[in-house]
Structures are given as structure tokens and as C-alpha cells.
Image (cartoon, rainbow, N blue to C red):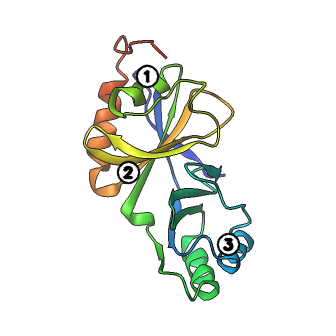
Amino acid sequence: MSEFKRISADGEVTISQPTLNGMVTIRADLTDEKTVTAIEQITGMALPSQRKITGDLIRGLAWMSPDELMVFCDDPETMTTQLNSALSGAFLVADVSHARAVFLLQGDGTREVLAKGAPVDLSPEAFTLGDFRRTRMGQVAVAFCMTSQSPDSFGLICFSSVQEFMFEWLVTACKKGSLPAYL
């Protein structure tokens, strides 16, 4: 598992980023049995169902849409080569590591921080381990998931072009005394 560097611990939630984080997107016919078998063999993970993730944002496989998956890995170059070789009929297999940023949020108020900006039911009954959601945080396209058994640990992905804005948004949203405590 990758190491995380703490980038903010001043608020109600600690914000960290992985020091290594590879991402490979796959666009393909995910109803094709040969395609699914190849993806599962190469990644070593079962295909997730809709709005789910197998694993986590360091080593995982996430459902992005009916024809798109995101592979989280430590060697995106090798993963891309292997998947391109096996999935000659895929629409697209590409290393998108440099186009995305990942944050890890930990703390008692993580659900409240995310709920401030995302139109998603984040109650513990509605959003559990393995859930993965593409949405918006304010006006920024993001995806997030629970990253461990802890109900207060989430991973968040955004485009790297808005990474600084997203970080500042998160820091502001988790300021001490600013959480509504309704979840």
C-alpha cells in the first residue's frame, strides 16, 4: 500500500494524498465475457457492480459507467500495456494518472464535509464500504468512496487541473466548528 503524506490536519478532518497513485481507464464492452475475464485476470480483482469499487484508491477497480472502469495501481505503465494487449477490442485503455488527483479524508466529520458539496446521501446506512460515487463537489467533477472499515475514512478523486481548488475547498469545508453534525 502506498504511503500518504498529510497535507492538512488543522480542521475537523485530516486531508492526505498518496505519494504514489496510478490510474488506468478502460472503456470497453463490460457485458462481453472475454473482456471481463481478461480485466479480472490482469488486475487480480473482480469486476465491481454499478457504483461500487473492489479494493481502494491505491489498489482497486472502480465502476465509472456502464462501459468504463478505473484501475488504481502502483504501476500504471505496465497495467496499460497488459490491458491494451489483452483487450484489443476495447474502445480505450489509457494511463490517466497525471490527469487525476486523489485525496484521503479521515475524521469524525468526513461525511459532513462531503455532504456540504455533494448531492449524495452520505448517511452511514446509505453509503457504506465499497460504495463509489461519481458526482460534483460544488461545481467540480469528483468521485469518492469509503476507503476502509472506518466509517469516517473516504477517498476523493478529481481532475489534477482543479486539485488546488479542491484542496482549498476541502480545507474550508472542514474548518473547526463548521460541521453541521446531522449525519
Q: How many marks?
A: 3
- Identify residue type, mark 3: Val
Q: Residue at x 74, y 73 (%)?
A: 41
**Mark 3 to mark 2: distance in Å?**
26 Å
Dot in front, 1 or 3: 3
Residue neighbourhood size for the residue with mark 1, other residues' Cα within 10 Å, grouped as few (<14), some (14–19), many (≥20) = many
Q: Nearer the viewer, residue 29 or 21?
A: 29
> Contact (CB < 8 A) between labels 1 and 3?
no
- Identify residue type, mark 1: Glu
In the image, which disc is placed on residue 158?
2
Sequence-first disc among 2 and 1: 1
Residue annotated with mark 3: 36
Q: Which residue is drawn at 54% across and 64% down?
A: 69
In the image, which disc is placed on residue 112?
1
Task: Give residue 150's quadrant in the image.
Answer: top right
Vertical order, 53 against 150 (above or below): below
In the image, which disc is placed on residue 96?
none
Q: In this view, does 11 lie to the left or right of 140?
A: right
Dot in front, 3 or 2: 3
Secondary structure under the numbered disc 2 in the rendered image:
strand
Q: Which of 85 and 88 is in front in this view?
A: 88
Q: Nearer the viewer, residue 31 or 113?
A: 31
